[in-house]
Amino acid sequence: MHKLLDSGVAAGFESSMKSAARFLLLFLSLSPQVSQGKVEDALIGLGAPPGLPVLWDELQGLNELVLSLKAEEVERRQTLRSLESRLRDREAEAERQGRSLDGLEEAVVQQREAMEWTEADRRLLTELNSDLRMKVEQLEEQSRAQAAELWSLGSRLNLSESKVDDLKKKNTALAAELPFLQTRLRASESTLEQLRRKNAVLAARLCNSESLMEELRMQVSDLQSRLDDLEEKLNRSAERHQLRETQLKEADRHLDELKRQNTAARNWSSLEDSLSTVMTQLLQLETNTTEQSTELMKLERKLNSTESLQIKLNNGTVQKPVPSPVVQSADLLLMESRLREQHSNTTELFERLSVSEKHLEDLKTDNSALELRLNVSEILLEDVKAGNTARGAEVEDVTLRLDFTEQQVDELRIQSTAVSFRLNEIDKHLQQVTITDSDKLKVAFSAGLTDSGSIGPFDEETALIFSKTITNIGQAYNQSAAPMRGIYYFSFTAADYLKGYMGLYLYRNNQPIIFNLDLNNHGGYASTSNSVALQLEEGDGVHLRLPASYRLYDDSRNFSVFSGFLLFPL
């Protein structure tokens, strides 16, 4: 007992030591200072399974991803800290500017108290003060606008960071889905190859159709030439018809003259002969006119068909409407009225410019004295502008960085949209493939032997007919061949209640695959069963045979059953 306990404790201690050593190796693999070769040697020393190096590679990849994400977070925090420091500096500068403005106002008050000017000078001072206040207000508005821009930039940075985090989450989800999608891609690539073959066939058919179109165009050109010839013939036949009509009119006139002149009975026979000849000529002319009218109808039909073909080939031409001279004259009148209005407006503008130039000359004379007093204030304003330019440069740097981050975010969005579009296309192809192949893949059957009791023994090997179909999905049972190429799984169970041997052969076409044998040495119900997975080509058949001098038993309780189903197609 003590030895067994010692051996159990030693085994538990060894397993705990191995688990601790593996944990240490995992910790060392996550640290960047330990090399991959050392970790693999340690794993081999511990007797790790062969699949662990792959896990080590994946852990190292995850470690690199975590380190890169941490570096990005540190960079972002540094940028945020720099932005906060810049904002604080700008607030301090704004306070300094406010203090300087307060000092300027105090200096102006002291100048008012120290110097007693005339009313004109006081008016000038009030104007100067108003101008200075306007400039100060403008500077304050600029500083407020800059503060608003900084706040908007900070909000944009926060939004961009949140978007980047969302995109990282989406990328991790897509990376998790990638292996499954790769398998789906392979299946879709096979379908795409089939579609390419179909496209090649369609391209050949397109070439044939294009050649047929060229032949049709040649036929149309031939038909047009033939139509021209037919039109010439029609013109000739029309001329002949007119000539025949004139001849008929002349014959009618001649008949009238003959009727008037030949009133005597002597010439009646000659008149009848001439009338008969004229009537025959009239009949011939009528037949000719009917034939010509039928030919004209046929030619009109051909012309209509050729015109429709020309419209289909040319796809129609639309002529642009030409403007009428009345519309052009109206446009010219409108242009003249507009030119007159512009001329009147220019004269008014010239007059206003002359008046404004006079006012400007007066203002120049008045402002010559004010320029000397404004020099001091302009120097102070230049100092303030220099500070504002520095701030503007800093704002430009921040905007450039924001634009760069936004470009990266846009690129990530474009990549994610492309991946999602590709995934949608793959899903569509897979859905189509699954819809088309789902009906083909549903192949399964199960059948019982008979209800008549014992079968056999026979003098020779005989094929068994399982007459009771329990399930028959895809109509795969009671057929002469396999419906499609693939891996099929077959199983059978045979039973008997008398002493002796019982067994079955399973054949693929005429080739024996399995022979299952069992001895019923006790008497009473006994059964034997077996199963096999077979690769069948389209058209192969599988059946069971009973050897000579063997027997089986089956009734309504289905002791002997034959089943099969499709595992996957090839």
Image (spheres, rainbow, N blue to C red):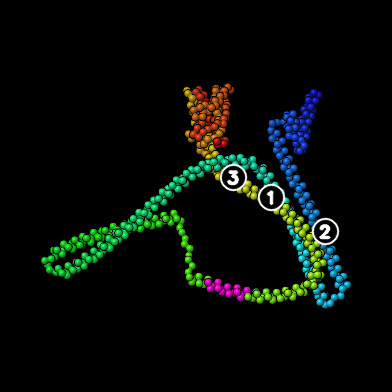
Secondary structure mainly formed by the magenta segment: helix
Q: What separation in Å lies between label 2 and label 3 (alpha carbons)? A: 58 Å
- Left of 560 or right of it: where is 208? left
| Residue beneath disc 1 | 408
Against 347, residue 63 (above or below) is above
| Among the two numbered marks 2 and 1 on one chain, the one whose residue lies closer to the N terminus | 2
Give the structural element (helix, strand or loop) at label 1: helix
144, 397: nearer the viewer? 397
Give the structural element (helix, strand or loop) at label 2: helix
| Residue beneath disc 3 | 426
x and y, in percent, of residue 277 in the image: 19, 61
| Residue beneath disc 2 | 92
x and y, in percent, of residue 8 in the image: 78, 27
| Among the two numbered marks 3 and 1 on one chain, the one whose residue lies closer to the N terminus | 1
- Left of 568 or right of it: where is 407? right
Q: Tell me, yes or no, whether the two marked residues, 3 and 1, touch with CB atoms within 8 Å.
A: no
555, 304: nearer the viewer? 304
x and y, in percent, of residue 64 in the image: 73, 41
Spot the residue most to the right.
114
Q: Residue at x 79, y 55 (%)?
A: 86
Q: What separation in Å lies between label 3 and label 1 (alpha carbons)? A: 27 Å
Spot the residue most to the left.
266
Against 211, residue 129 (above or below) is below
| Mark 3: amino acid | Ile
| The magenta segment | 332-346
| Mark 1: amino acid | Gln
x and y, in percent, of residue 241 in the image: 27, 61
